[in-house]
Image (cartoon, rainbow, N blue to C red):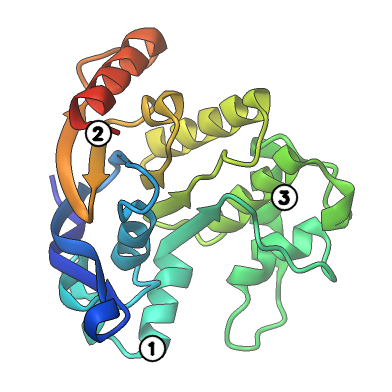
Amino acid sequence: MENIITGRNIVKTFGRGVEQAKVLDRVNVEITKGEFVAVMGPSGSGKSTLLFALSGMDDISDGSVKFGDTELSKLREDELADVRRMKMGFIFQQPTMLKNLNLLDNIILPAARDGKKDAVVPTQRAKALMKKTGIDGLENRDTTEVSGGQLQRAGICRALINAPEILFADEPTGALNAKSAEEIMGLLVDINREGTAILLVTHDAKIAARADRILFTKDGSIVSELSLQKFSGKDMRSRTEKVLTQMAAVGI
């Protein structure tokens, strides 16, 4: 199957001289179209840095990252911004919403471009996404007038507003209670089944067990990989046990 993301010999360093730290050390990653990949590892292992590198949100020190056939490092900043805005979606632990806009306007915001004022189409799509994610009726609420789970659902709607080919999710359930986390993961699984690829960073074995494949990072390298495709998506107990066993085997 065709790759949507291809990373080759990715190196990311921070600092200079004796204080220089290598956070990613010659990492190779392939994500195919429509695949659901999770990344796990201890704190400081480079998992979030890898997500930022593969999405073009952060420059890499060496190596290459391709989105399809396009090498991200060769794009101008405006071209890279367009790729991220139109073909990628981003979900974070704490959704970054503008406090002076209501939920609907926050969701529509990434669809605004070229100074065009006609927002009919993105508004219709936003409302459809809000209904799909169970937050219809909250369009005019301020960001402070909804729960954490509802705000994360709005963040998912915003990430999907431009129908991206891949979602990058960094600890998307980390700030939620167990019930909300389960609901959000159910939404992400549904989104993936509809054809959107997902790269998700998590420390939670139950969350990672929803993925097709898990990459385990340690000391800036991918030290192990686990496929869960042979397990039924409904057999979460077996999937989670397999993840926990692999975590123990690699020492995370």
Q: Which mark is residue 127?
A: 3
Callout 2: few (<14), some (14-19), or many (20+) C-alpha neighbours within 10 Å?
Answer: some
Q: Which mark is residue 163?
A: none
- Whether the residues at callouts 2 and 3 have beta carbons within 8 Å, the answer is no
Question: Who comes first in sequence, dot 1 or dot 3?
Answer: 1
Residue 202 in view, yes or no = yes
Q: Mark 2 points at which residue?
A: 213
Q: Name the residue under label 1.
A: 77
Q: Nearer the viewer, residue 62 or 120?
A: 62
- x 22%, y 62%: residue: 24
Where in the figure is residue 238, as x and y percent of width and height? 32, 9
Report whether 120 appears left or right of 26.
right
Q: Which residue lies furthest to the front in this view?
A: 18
Q: How much space separates mark 2 and mark 3, taking CA atoms?
A: 32 Å
Q: Is residue 196 above or below residue 20?
A: above
Q: Quadrant of the C terminus?
A: top left
Circle 3: residue type: Lys
Circle 1: residue type: Glu
Q: Is residue 62 above or below residue 36?
A: below
The part of the image, by quadrant, that contains residue 195 is: top left
Question: Who comes first in sequence, dot 1 or dot 2?
Answer: 1
